[in-house]
Image (cartoon, rainbow, N blue to C red):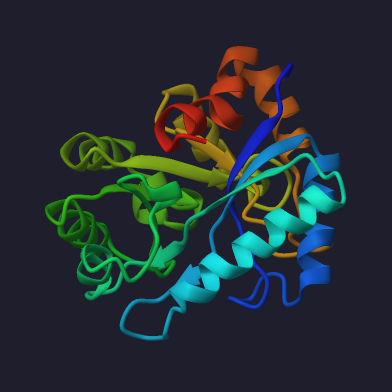
Amino acid sequence: MDEPFVDMHVHALYGMDDGAGTQRAALAMLERAAADGVGTMILTPHARPGLCPFNGREHVRRLGVLRRLCAERGLNVALFGGAEILCTEMAARFLAEGRIPTMNGTRRVLLEWHGDASVDEIERGLRNVGNSGFLPIIAHVERYAALYMDRKRLERLRETYDAQVQIDCEAVLDRWPLLRRRAVFALIREEMVEYVASDAHDTQRQRSRMREAAQLIGDRFGEETARRLMGGNARRYLNV
């Protein structure tokens, strides 16, 4: 690809969740991402509305710190704010009250569920968030067998709630079983995925692999598909 990637799901905002624990760890992640071809990142610490406090003031402050450190070190990565939101019963209310961030201040919100969530549970969350005026992005859809194995139902949810779909890089690479990878490839082939992101938490076990994923997607589905999934859609929908 001839343009930098946009990683719209990454846990590099230090001290906020199970991702980078310190500024040094966060900078290592940002350096790894830059070397991996990433030019823009939305930092998405976990938010669990009603279960764990989310410090919005620290979210803003630490984002500013990382931006300043990037500038001081000449690291050419643009950073934006967001969150990966566990879709609890309180999620819609917390979003409406501005207590947890959306994706770069847009109406798009990155939502996750427990891996064994049913389609009905996922749909209830999509409905509640949508009724509050937000547009959902389903994070790492490859974790929800109820969705990736039933593309007709997933497409209905996409149409009904204007929902978008994100997959992790590792879903198209080597982490997931072959059957699951085939299901993910089918979603890409049928244009049911908007974003591929690293979901990186560190520089080792769960690291940025955007370049590898872009190469594989480009080889299998064409450069235009890779360009759209690895950055084009994020620029279009998330204003980065």
Looking at the image, residue 118 sits to the left or right of residue 239; the answer is left
| Depth order, front residue of 52/217 | 52
Residue, x 24% and y 50% (percent of image)? 134
Which quadrant is home to the N terminus? top right
Look at 67% across and 48% down and name the residue there: 170
**In the picture shown, does residue 194 fall above or below 124?**
above
Is 127 displayed left or right of 230 in the figure? left
One can see residue 212 in this view: yes
Query: Percent x, y for residue 186?
Result: 48, 30
* Of residues 118 and 5, the one drawn nearer to the viewer in this rendering: 5
Q: Horizontal and vertical percent for residue 212?
A: 77, 35
Of 119 and 59, which appears nearest the observer? Answer: 59
The residue that appears at 24% across and 75% down in the rendered structure is 90
Determine which quarter of the picture holds residue 114.
Answer: bottom left
* Above or below, comparing residue 126 to residue 34 in the picture: below
Residue 50 on image: x %, y %: 31, 83
Q: Position of residue 162 (x, y in %)?
A: 24, 38
108 horizontally vs 168: left or right: left
Residue 36, by quadrant, is top right
Asked which quadrant contains residue 88, the reply is: bottom left
Q: Is residue 11 visible?
A: no
